[in-house]
Amino acid sequence: MKRTLIYTILYLMLPFSLLANNKTDSLKSATKIVADQNSSIPGLTSDRFNRPVISWVQALSENRFQFCYAISPDNGKTFTEPVIVTPSTSISPHAENAPKLLFKPSGEIIAVWGVTETSLKQGMIALQEEHAAHQSGKIIEAKKSKYAGQIYYSQSFDEGASWTTARPLVNDPAGFDQRYFDIALNKQGEAVIIWLDNRKESTKEGSALYIATTHQREGFQQQHKIAETTCQCCRTKLHIDQKQQIHVVYRAILQDSIRDMVHQVSMDGGKNFSTPKRIHEDNWVVRACPHTGPTMTTNKEGLHFAWYSAAPAKASYYVQSTDNGGHFSEYAALSELARHPQMAALGNGEIALVWDEVSRSGPSPTTGITIEWKSADGKTTSRQSLTNPEEMASYPVLIPLEEGCMVAYQVKTAAGQRIGWQIHKK
């Protein structure tokens, strides 16, 4: 028993010098696989040394999961052995409410993930015992609803070797539902987070949008509401531009039934935000949850947005703004099959945009990843497929590299579901 425990501890503390098994896993494309375990929900970010970091949710059993990540020491050619965020066994996997990592210049790493009442019961017994001590006996649990959730986070101050006890983002007893978050780094080296929250003044359907910022090692502080009412089940987008303006994009509920994307910007570090403004008047009337969110980036030409809507027709769309959200261009459809768009501005100002597409041309539906390149002013210059139909690839994410970009996604292999990636240059 002692020997098993020692081996387990040594495994969790494996150094970054041990490289992961970066293989194609019999796939007939450029896709490389980052880990051998059954995994889903890819994420991409950079560490404080600007090295690419890929993250995912690994299945431990049918109902238990954990958050993992790996760092590339060679600009995306290979990745280290996985690092496990050990307190994350409460995680509730949801591709739209994806877990995220943020690496502060101070060396601190913050891992954030969503939980539900079910995932807390299945994977949080030990965590609740620790949390009870941390909170002097008070345990904050999600409201007993299958739709309610919470956001938990943990910090590491030793390059991921150990992690603090996971704690909820919100400790207010009135706050029983927090989901669909996004995080970014500000110029002070602190983490900024936005999320959807049940705490709102309006009696109308929907959620409120909240924001908070970390303070040194003390975690997220100064939580306050910045908007209501929002669609309560769509991913949000947070973007901090080179001028340190904080942009938020989310699906709002307008006139009780219209669910369109809106943009707000703060020029004072998140204390105050502009009035919400629609990036396009889709006028999508839907009495249900679309479960899709927006993406956004900025370059010298202005703001760039992409999103999915079923109005005026089912498709993913693109617009831009050259006056910081005062006005928006005419929309352009990316593809009527495009879902889950993600975009990033590269060092030369060009824009890389990826999405997944469902094809029904064969005997059964397949999904694949498409990449589109745009000039700095938003004009499409090229487009191509990155995966084969049999890979059943979905939920792509991307980050810029010194040349081109890295794209990661869920992919189906002969051995099961994995996280794949590839480097793409125009």
Image: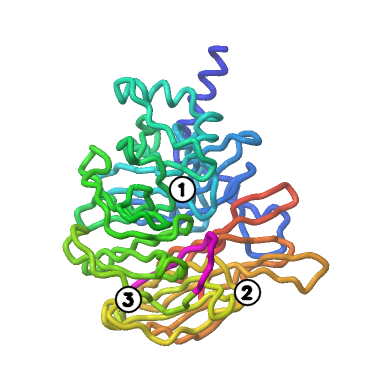
Estimate the x, y position of residue 145 in percent, counting from the top left. Answer: 51, 40
The one nearer the camera, 197 or 52, is 197
The location of residue 139, given as percent across then percent down, is 37, 27
In the rendered image, the residue lying farthest to the front is: 203
Q: Mark 1–mark 3 contact, CB under 8 Å?
A: no
In the rendering, which numbered label is found on residue 229?
A: none
Q: Which residues are magenta?
A: 284-299
| Tag 2: amino acid | Leu
Q: Secondary structure at mark 2?
A: loop
Task: Tell me the number on the disc at residue 99.
Answer: 1
Q: Residues within 10 Å of mark 3 (few under 14, many from 20)?
A: many
- Residue 64, image x and y in percent? 58, 34
Q: Which label sits in the foreground, 1 or 3?
A: 1
**Mark 1 neighbour class, 10 Å CA radius: few under 14, some 14 to 19, many 20 or more:** many
- Amino acid type of disc 1? Pro
Say which residue label 2 marks: 337
Residue bearing the label numbered 3: 299
Q: Main SS type for the magenta part?
A: loop
Q: Residue at x 59, y 72 (%)?
A: 338
Q: Are marks 1 and 2 in contact (CB under 8 Å)?
A: no
Considering only order in the chain, which callout, 3 or 1, is on the residue closer to the N terminus?
A: 1
Q: Given the image, on which type of amino acid does mark 3 rest?
A: Asn
Judge by depth and name the residue closer to the eye, 174 or 84. 174
> What whole-number distance in Å separates the C-alpha atoms at marks 1 and 2?
26 Å
Q: CA distance from mark 1 to mark 3?
A: 26 Å
